[in-house]
Image: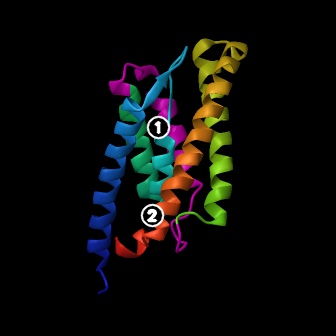
Amino acid sequence: MQRTKSQEHLKNMLLTALFAAMIYVITAFVKIPTHQGYIHVGDGIIYIAAAILPAPYAMAAGAIGGGLSDYLSGYAVWVLPTVLIKASQAALFTSRKKNIVNKRNITAVIFSAVVCIAGYYLAGGIMYGDFGAALADVPTNFIQSAASAALFVFLGVVLDRMDFKKHI
């Protein structure tokens, strides 16, 4: 059965809200505290959202989920950089392929890590007033990106085996 444009929009809005909530929960509650913030795997859920939803919806889910996590976890100063970085990360993926895990999205994971690491380095350098001090966050952002990539591939393979995209 073919969906109307308004039905497709409603489905995407509902999935955006669901993904934003999942991103928030995974980011805020499944984390390891660090010297300036925390390491989390919420980006892996952003990648899943971006491989399922059209780009504007995935960008919104990533920005809302990540931003809420920072704001409600006591890191309000990071909300604006997080919103921009998470939306940018989501924009790198494609939802137009049959499978979640595909060549384009595996490549996007790599570029997403660069966006995350460089984005938080620049934001930290501006906020700290010292780009040398911001270098201290690079290793933790690398670990976060690698762990999120692993979660994305694991969940993506599981969802692909279930033909998840075909059933939503």
Q: How would you classify the magenta stretch by its main secondary structure?
A: helix
Whole-percent x, y for residue 11 in the image = 29, 66
CA neighbours of label 1 inside 10 A, class few (<14), some (14 to 19), many (20+): many
Looking at the image, which is closer to me, 131 or 44? Answer: 44
**Helix, strand or loop status at disc 1:** helix
**Residue 135 against residue 65 in the figure, above or below:** above
* Mark count: 2
Using the rendered image of the protein, determine whether residue 101 is visible from the camera's viewpoint: yes
Q: Residue at x 67, y 48 (%)?
A: 111
Asked whether residue 90 is drawn in magenta, I would say yes
**Helix, strand or loop status at disc 2:** helix
Q: Is residue 121 left or right of residue 95?
A: right
Q: Is residue 163 left or right of residue 25?
A: right
Q: Residue at x 50, y 43 (%)?
A: 43
Asked whether residue 131 is drawn in magenta, I would say no
C-alpha gap between disc 1 and disc 2:
26 Å
Whole-percent x, y for residue 162 in the image = 42, 70
Give the amino acid type for the residue marked by disc 1 in the picture. Answer: Val
Whole-percent x, y for residue 13 in the image = 30, 59
Highlighted range, magenta: 71-99
Residue 159's label in the rendered image is 2
**Mark with earlier residue (1, 2):** 1
Whether residues under marks 1 and 2 lie with C-beta atoms below 8 angstroms apart, the answer is no
Quadrant of the snapshot with the C terminus: bottom left
